[in-house]
Amino acid sequence: MIFLANILQPIEDAAESVLQFFHDDVGLSWGTSIIALTIVVRTILIPLTYKQIKGMRALQALQPQIKQIQEKYKNDRQRMQQEMMRFYQENKVNPLASCLPLILQLPIFFALFQLLRGSSFEQDVESSGGEGWFFVNSVVENPQGAETVILMLLFAGSMALSMLVTMRSSPSTMGNQQYILLGGFALVGVFFVPSFPAGLSLYWITTNFWTVLQAYAAAKLIPAPAVTTPEEVAAAKPPPKPPKKRKKRR
């Protein structure tokens, strides 16, 4: 834990500086400052998110060929994986690229957790009277009573909505399993919200709503690329040249 804390310390210091700026210089409450911090983080990640969405769009356009490969080698899992990797390389698509923005957010999330649990930051918040956000009394304390219920509903609802939008905008072969996964993520809020500082819930709820708005913007601004199917490629090929006639010997 000490090793992890040392790694996250620069991120924690940067997050504290941003929060202090929004609170002390801009005049926002601590809760609203956390929301502003989330927007800053997601804005910084826009270039990576753009690449992620383009990769998802490319996968979406390549789904007919992917399904053909899966159907052709459905009885040979190892061969299917080999063919899928070759297919991804030929089309310059990385199926794991969509995970990168989420992975990059995790260190920020853990650094924010450390910050909200730190005695120094707690004193800063308490000295200013807590200053939460609407129904949130204090960002450094665990929610209580009705505050917990509202945060749980917002967390579960925003998580389910963001997952649903992401699943509909990205290719998936999971079928009904994806909706089971969606429900599982939404239920995380039942255990997450009461056990952590309210500021962490505000951060993740804001992230979820950003994801929803981002998906709608991407649908307008980044359409799926047109990728020809194998049938269209075959149809576009010129007919084979007729064989040359041999000259008769006299």
Image (cartoon, grey):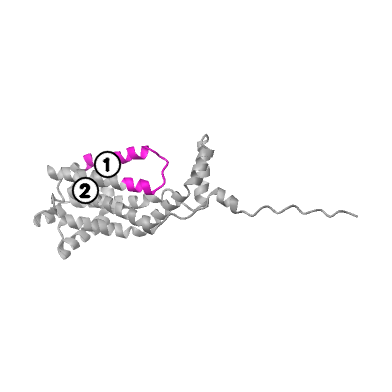
Q: Tag 2's secondary structure?
A: helix
- Residue at the limit of the structure toward the bottom, as seen here: 25
Residue 155 covered by magenta stretch:
no
Q: Earlier in the sequence, mark 2 or mark 1?
A: 1
Q: Residue at x 51, y 50 (%)?
A: 89
Residue 201 % position (x, y): 21, 48
Q: CA distance from mark 2 to mark 1?
A: 13 Å
Residue 8 % position (x, y): 27, 53
Residue 186 marker: 1
Q: Badge 2 local density, few (<14 within 10 Å), some, or many (20+)? A: many
Q: Report the side of 228 relative to 192 (left or right).
A: right
User: Which image quadrant for residue 221?
Assistant: bottom left
Residue 84 marker: none
**Callout in the foreground (2, 1):** 1
Which residue has dot 2 on it? 201
- For the C terminus, the image quarter is bottom right
Q: Amino acid at mark 2?
A: Ser
Q: Residue at x 29, y 41 (%)?
A: 185
Camera-side residue of 116 and 238: 238
Camera-side residue of 70 and 17: 70
Specify whether residue 115 is in view: yes
First to last magenta residue range? 163-192
